[in-house]
Image: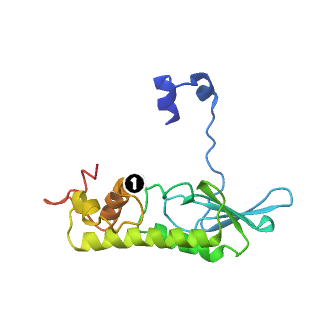
């Protein structure tokens, strides 16, 4: 991506040219602890959701969680290409189970939230996943799924196209005649 920006001359091109990408030197499986000069920070991978590489940071002595886009407060969760709508509810449930009652949760977008907010959003994520599974099982074509679920989606329909497309793909769209997953939802 960086090479593309430089080649296109995207501003600020001089600053892009100075960027050096350093590959990770430590891979995180489930948990990894970092010592920041006497302060422990736990890096946890609880599963897939917003992306396949969502990690959260827990700062135990500050009772604080930095959770990125697994949780969003300023609007509904962002389902984009490469999201995992069927896995996201379990990932957020695993997160909610670890959050203490007095812990602060800093989402990817919006103001800090509580464990209760994370649990409520997890319920909404589970409703999206459940409806995707239901529509897929009923052989509703992916291109018709949003409208077929109208009135039942917990988030605005216009933000759920990628969730439906990615969910249908995960449930085994085959590309056979009648499959519309390859074209996605506009």
Q: Residue furthest right?
A: 38
Q: State which quadrant residue 166 falls in.
A: bottom left
Q: Is residue 185 left or right of residue 101?
A: left
Name the foreground residue: 85 vs 107.
107
Tell how many labels: 1
11 or 100: nearer the viewer: 100
Q: Which residue is mark 1?
A: 159
Percent x, y for residue 76?
48, 58
Q: Is residue 148 visible?
A: yes
> Which image quadrant for residue 110?
bottom right
Q: Residue furthest front?
A: 151
Q: Secondary structure at mark 1?
A: helix
Above or below, 135 relative to 184: below
Residue 37 placement, left or right of 111 = right
- Residue at position x 59%, y 68% in the image: 117
Residue 40: where, in percent of width, then height? 79, 63
The residue under the point 65% across, 75% down is: 98
Crowding at dot 1, Cα within 10 Å, few <14 / some 14-19 / many 20+, comes out as some
- Residue 179 in the image: state x and y as whole percent: 19, 60
Q: Is residue 91 visible?
A: no
Foreground pick, 100 / 8: 100
x%, y% of residue 173? 25, 63
**Which residue is at 41% across, 66% downward?**
154
What is the quadrant of residue 59 in the picture? bottom right
Instruction: Depth check: give the residue in front, 148 or 36.
Output: 148
Q: Is residue 151 above or below residue 184?
A: below
Where 9 falls versus 102 (above or below)?
above
Q: Residue at x 37, y 73 (%)?
A: 130
């Amino acid at each position: 991506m960086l090479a593309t920006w430089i080649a296109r001359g995207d501003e600020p091109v001089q600053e892009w040219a100075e960027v050096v990408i350093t590959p990770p030197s430590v891979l995180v499986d489930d948990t990894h602890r970092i010592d920041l000069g006497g302060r422990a920070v736990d890096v946890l991978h609880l599963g897939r959701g917003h992306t396949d590489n969502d990690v959260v940071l827990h700062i135990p002595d500050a009772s604080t969680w930095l959770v990125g886009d697994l949780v969003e407060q300023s609007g509904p969760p962002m389902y984009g290409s490469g999201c995992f709508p069927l896995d996201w509810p379990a990932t957020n449930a695993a997160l909610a189970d670890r959050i203490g009652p007095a812990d602060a949760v800093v989402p990817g977008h919006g103001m800090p939230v509580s464990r209760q907010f994370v649990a409520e959003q997890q319920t909404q994520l589970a409703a999206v996943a459940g409806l995707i599974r239901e529509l897929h099982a009923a052989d509703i074509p992916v291109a018709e799924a949003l409208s077929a679920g109208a009135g039942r989606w917990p988030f605005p329909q216009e933000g759920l196209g990628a969730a439906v497309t990615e969910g249908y793909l995960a449930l085994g769209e085959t590309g056979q005649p009648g499959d519309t997953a390859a074209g996605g939802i506009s």
